[in-house]
């Protein structure tokens, strides 16, 4: 490879990436690919505190089950995710959701109700199903319908998801349909989540049409016309990999042949060093020698990044520390199928916050992705820990299992005892894009302008979904190498 003249006295550019979740791994991968494509000599170090790569992506393959501890599928219409899988040679292993057991449920007032058909951006956007659903009372439906004739425009303030949806569709549609779907993604409290930071598309619909419902109805119609012209995607909206999402982590890891991967390497501080010309970054590592780098990409959760950067830039660190996080737990349980009376005719259910239950959602994994459980078994994946219920991560496995079983008994009438249980705790793993989030991001960007060679990437900033993480990593890799030539 041509030796790069990188303004580093002729030596290779040294890049350190802190955090080996998908954000850090994908950054390392795209840096390596970009450097190779451009003939740059770049020395990449990926530093991960734990003993494995993948971060919250964690698949356990046991007793014939494929159990996801963290994410279990990705959105197929965000191109970065499926794009990377194809690039990694995983196309043949992309698995869609079962077409046999389509549909999901919302638990409300003592029963599981089918999610109204035809959601656009998580909002009901077909009048028939919205008026037929038993999730919302007739006054609630009429209130939602009022949006068609009583259009409004936000005043430009950063408003919460709750405020925006309630203003358009009323309290009941918000509480019984929209809130549980949002909470299923962010484990968040929609009364605090910023609409502009989570669903800016809804603001665009409002700006264009005034009425949210009318705008979404039009989008839904256009989509149907598009599909009629043969433009339907070959994938279901949610896809996964045959051997679990860890398959992506394993494939990526095997491709990082030009990257020095350091596991069990916790970075305590990222400071500016005066050694060398131009000045470098100095990473203080627990129990190891400091690492010098020309560029540092911090790909850790914002609270961990804040701790690392505090001595270098307290203002930046304070802003990062103000990004709140929710803690969640997933409990997967396997039962002999014959012991579950419920037909499991769908992908699972979500539970609205107003129900006052601790269970946030339950995926009927063996119906959604049948290959994940051996024949004759039912596999469920239950989520606990909505924003404000962080203490759930401190409960014992026994207590968590008992809690989940109590909930399944009350909601689905499950009386059976599971034969296998897997518990995964995710303390402070899901960032909350609360009102003011975009303002905080602008403040972070402002600080970074005066810190050349320092980059931040991760789910704390612009999207929590795995495809968002991959897309951002690709962008950051370009920025890191911008201005460097072979
Ligand atoms: C339970 C759960 C379910 C989810 N479900 C889905 C889903 O179905 N689909 C979807 O698209 N998304 C889902 N998400 C979101 C998505 O998985 C995450 O947003 C994404 O994987 C985060 O990747 P990341 O690399 O930014 O962060 P992380 O995965 O959190 O990785 C950060 C890494 O930094 C390391 N680190 C921290 N501090 C230091 C330090 N000081 N030194 C070195 N290393 C450090 C950590 O050990 C960790 O490995 C889910 C998330 C959770 C928690």
Image (tube, rainbow, N blue to C red):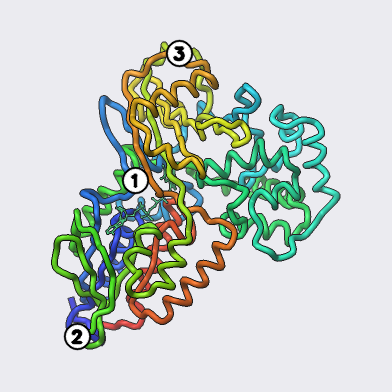
The residue wearing badge 1 is 57
Q: Nearer the viewer, residue 300 or 123?
A: 300
| First in sequence: mark 1 vs mark 2 | 1
Spatial distance from mark 2 to mark 3, Cα to Cα? 67 Å
Residue under label 3, please give it. 415
Q: Is residue 237 visible?
A: no
Is the residue indicated by label 1 positioned so its CB lies within 8 Å of ligand 1? yes
Image quadrant in which you'd find residue 139: top right
- Say which label, 3 or 1, has the lower sequence index: 1
Q: Tag 1, which secondary structure?
A: loop
Instruction: Between label 1 and label 2, give the one nearer the viewer.
Output: 2
First along the sequence among labels 2 and 3: 2
Measured from the top left, where is residue 400 in percent x and y?
Answer: 39, 29
List x then y, in percent, for residue 333. 37, 25
Callout 1 crowding tier (Cα within 10 Å): few <14, some 14–19, many ≥20: many
Q: Is residue 335 above or below residue 266?
A: above
**Rounded to the nearest whole Å, what is the CA distance between mark 3 and mark 1?**
31 Å
Q: Secondary structure at mark 2?
A: loop
The N terminus lies in which quarter of the figure? bottom left
Which element is circle 3 on?
loop
Q: Residues within 10 Å of mark 3 (few under 14, many from 20)?
A: some
Task: Tell me residue 50's x, y (percent).
Answer: 24, 51
Question: Can you say whether 7 is above or below 331 in the image?
Answer: below
From the image, tell me which residue sits under label 2. 276
Q: Is residue 61 visible?
A: yes
Q: Is residue 365 above or below residue 375?
A: below
């Amino acid at each position: 490879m041509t030796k790069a003249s990188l303004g580093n006295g002729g030596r290779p550019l040294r890049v350190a990436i802190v955090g080996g979740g998908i954000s850090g791994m994908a950054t390392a991968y795209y840096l390596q690919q970009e450097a190779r494509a451009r003939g740059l000599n770049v020395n990449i170090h990926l530093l991960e505190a734990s003993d494995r790569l993948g971060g919250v992506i964690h698949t356990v393959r046991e007793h014939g089950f494929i159990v996801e501890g963290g994410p279990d599928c990705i959105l197929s219409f965000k191109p970065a995710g499926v794009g990377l899988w194809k690039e990694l040679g995983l196309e043949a292993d992309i698995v869609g959701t079962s077409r046999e057991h389509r549909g999901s449920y919302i638990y409300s007032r003592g029963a599981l109700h089918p999610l109204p058909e035809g959601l656009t951006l998580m909002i009901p956007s077909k009048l028939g199903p919205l008026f037929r659903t038993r999730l919302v009372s007739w006054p609630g439906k009429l209130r939602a319908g009022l949006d068609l004739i009583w259009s409004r425009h936000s005043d430009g303030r950063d408003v919460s998801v709750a405020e925006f949806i309630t203003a358009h569709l009323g309290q009941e549609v918000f509480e019984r349909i929209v809130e549980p779907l949002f909470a299923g993604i962010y484990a968040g409290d929609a009364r605090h989540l910023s609409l502009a930071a989570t669903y800016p598309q809804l603001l665009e619909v409002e700006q264009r049409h005034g009425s949210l419902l009318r705008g979404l109805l039009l989008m839904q119609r256009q989509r149907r016309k598009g599909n009629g012209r043969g433009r339907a995607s070959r994938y279901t909206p949610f896809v996964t990999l045959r051997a679990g999402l860890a398959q992506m982590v394993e494939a990526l890891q095997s491709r990082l042949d030009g990257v020095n991967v350091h596991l069990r390497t916790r970075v305590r501080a990222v400071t500016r060093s005066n050694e060398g010309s131009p000045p470098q970054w100095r990473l203080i590592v627990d129990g190891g020698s400091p690492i010098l780098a020309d560029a540092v990409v911090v790909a850790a959760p914002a609270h961990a990044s804040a701790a690392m950067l505090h001595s270098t830039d307290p203002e930046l660190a304070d802003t990062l520390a103000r990004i709140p996080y929710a803690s969640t737990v997933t409990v997967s349980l396997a039962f002999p199928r014959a012991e579950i009376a419920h037909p499991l005719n769908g992908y699972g259910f979500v539970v609205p916050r107003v129900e006052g239950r601790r269970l946030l959602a339950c995926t009927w994994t063996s119906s959604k992705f049948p290959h994940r459980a051996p024949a004759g078994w039912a596999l469920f994946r239950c989520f606990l820990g909505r924003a404000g219920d962080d203490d759930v991560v401190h409960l014992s496995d026994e207590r968590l299992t008992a809690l989940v079983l109590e909930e399944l008994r009350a909601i689905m009438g499950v009386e059976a005892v599971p034969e296998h249980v897997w518990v995964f705790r995710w303390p402070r793993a899901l960032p909350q894009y609360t009102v003011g989030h975009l303002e905080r991001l602008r403040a972070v960007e402002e600080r970074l302008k005066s810190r050349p060679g320092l980059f931040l990437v991760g789910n704390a900033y612009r999207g929590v979904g795995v495809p968002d993480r991959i897309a951002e990593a690709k962008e950051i890799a370009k920025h890191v190498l911008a201005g460097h030539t072979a």
